[in-house]
Amino acid sequence: MNRASLLTLLACGALAGFILLPLAQAVVLSFTSTLGTPEMPAGALGFHNYVNIFQTPALRASIINSLIYVLLNVAFCLLAALPAAYALARYQFVGDRHFLILLLAFRVTPSVVLSLPIFILFSRAGLVNSPLGIALVHCVFNLPIAIWILESFIAAIPRAYDEMAFIDGHSGPSFFARFLVPAIAPGIAVAAFFCFIFSWVEVVFARILTVTGGKPITMAISALFSFQTDWGLVMAMTVFSMLPGVLMIFLIRNHIARGFVVRT
Amino acid sequence: MKPYRNAAWLLMLPAVAVMGFVAVLPLVAVFNYSFHDIFSLDSASWVGADWYTAIMLSPRFWTSLCRSAAFSALALGVQLPLGIGVALMLRGAGPRVAILMLMCVALPLAVPANMIAGLWLALVRSEGLAGQALAALHFDFDYKFTAAHTWILILLVDTWHWLGLVVVLAYAGLTSIPPAYYQAAAVDGASRVAVFRLIELPMIAGTMWIVLLLRLVDTFMIYTEVMMINAGGPQDATTFLSLDLGEEIKAYSYGTAAARAMVDFLIVLTVVWIFVQLRKSDQSAGTEPI
């Protein structure tokens, strides 16, 4: 082994250490009894924190709530982004550049800026405390990302591919479902991954839109903090909430590096 | 060249409808609130530009603005070079190591946003791993009362959270460079620095612009982590723009909060506009990938 590759190895190790250190401690804590009970004295190791998650109704409900709105959000984003991305990739039209700039502006608008009117608007529309409301509002930052990713994947396919499908008599929904979606499957996976992750971890909108019910995982974790915080349970919930994201990172690992180009 | 067809707007309809409802409509509402004094939503009185004048004359606003700008500069100065450096290293290390490391740096993106700071607080409190290590070194790390330490912790947490995005996108840009470019450089006997400056940097510029913009705006408006770590303290040393806005919303002063939200939005819009202009001149200068 030469010096350069040894240096690379050391640097990779240092970086992995920096990234994994807080996570490693969280995993260790999640298996530790931090408050202590008669059966489990403080410091004892075991799965009890994870068992606790499923025995606490509020935590169980929060997992279901999060799953519902995140999956709804991914569905909304993909369904709305696919035709839009196709239009932007294949045609020029009046205002296409303005639309892209607007998309960029909304992607980077801080959630705090929109939180107040969204709360008022959604409470009038009866969308507070419902997963549907959160699923919709997360489109503000996820729809632009989905459009950018899908657009760059569609643009990479030669136009002749579309024309071949049109000649075969496919158009509209049948073209999208039978030709376009299979051709850009990795792009759909990457878009779904980013929408899933950003919606799953978001807190500002998720907090203001769940006043009395429908609390997501993030809010359920916040509610665990008290005068005497059970850090073991907090960490167990955190680690548990990371599982879907980690699984998705693993599944798309070979496509994640394709990235995306933002058009302006 | 793409054909010109206005009927393509039909395909845009679902996206336009969603963005109109969740983004444009609320923005118009904020704009409207910002000119009113609102006790309750049914009794609002027109106050014109009073709130805006008050904000412009408030020293607190300008200090927060400078603080946010300073934090953005610091965070970008650390994260962009570090992220590009890591990506270059991974490119040299081969695809197997690279994919393993990309998965690793992407992990923090999967942590719930309100636990990002929580994980680090657990690490630096006296029972935590880093807390014990610092105590053993007799280093008095006090993020609650020493402003410099609070800043370092916030910077560390933000870098931990977002480095993955910079690395992934920079690596994506690097892998799209055709091998022929490197071969040509090798034939010319170009140095490593020259290869980076004349081939790699221009080729990843397109991807890095968006990373720059996303990170710039996100650090400028950083909220959740700062709130969790020290709620803007000690003595307002970490009170950034978004924390001021959050306070006004919590105090139910809708009118002022709306005006502040509008000011913050205009700042963001200006940044985006400058970004688009810069990219345009960059593209016409011919540094874009072909």
Image: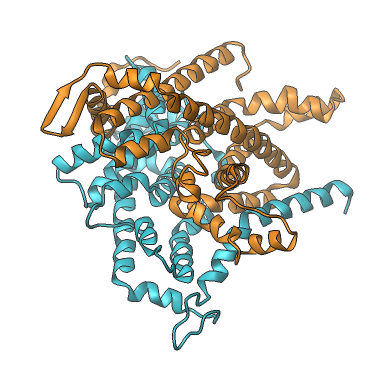
Chain colours: A cyan, B orange
Q: Nearer the viewer, residue A147 or B137?
A: B137
Q: How far from the left and from the top, in percent, is residue A258?
A: 56, 39
Answer left or right for B237 relative to B6: right
Q: Nearer the viewer, residue A39 or A250?
A: A39
Q: Is residue A12 above or below residue B137?
A: above
Q: How far from the left and from the top, in percent, is residue B98?
A: 67, 48
Q: How far from the left and from the top, in percent, is residue B23?
A: 29, 31
How many numbered marks have been drawn onto this rendered protein structure? 0
Q: How far from the left and from the top, in percent, is residue A147?
A: 39, 33
Q: Is residue A7 above or below residue A233?
A: above
Answer left or right for B136 relative to A191: right
Q: Is residue B172 above or below residue B140?
A: above
Q: Nearer the viewer, residue A214 or A253?
A: A214
Q: Residue furthest bottom?
A: A39
Q: Residue furthest left?
A: B42
- Which residue is depicted at the point 42% across and 38% down? B243
Q: Nearer the viewer, residue B171 or B63?
A: B63
- Which residue is depicted at the point 54% across and 82% down? A44
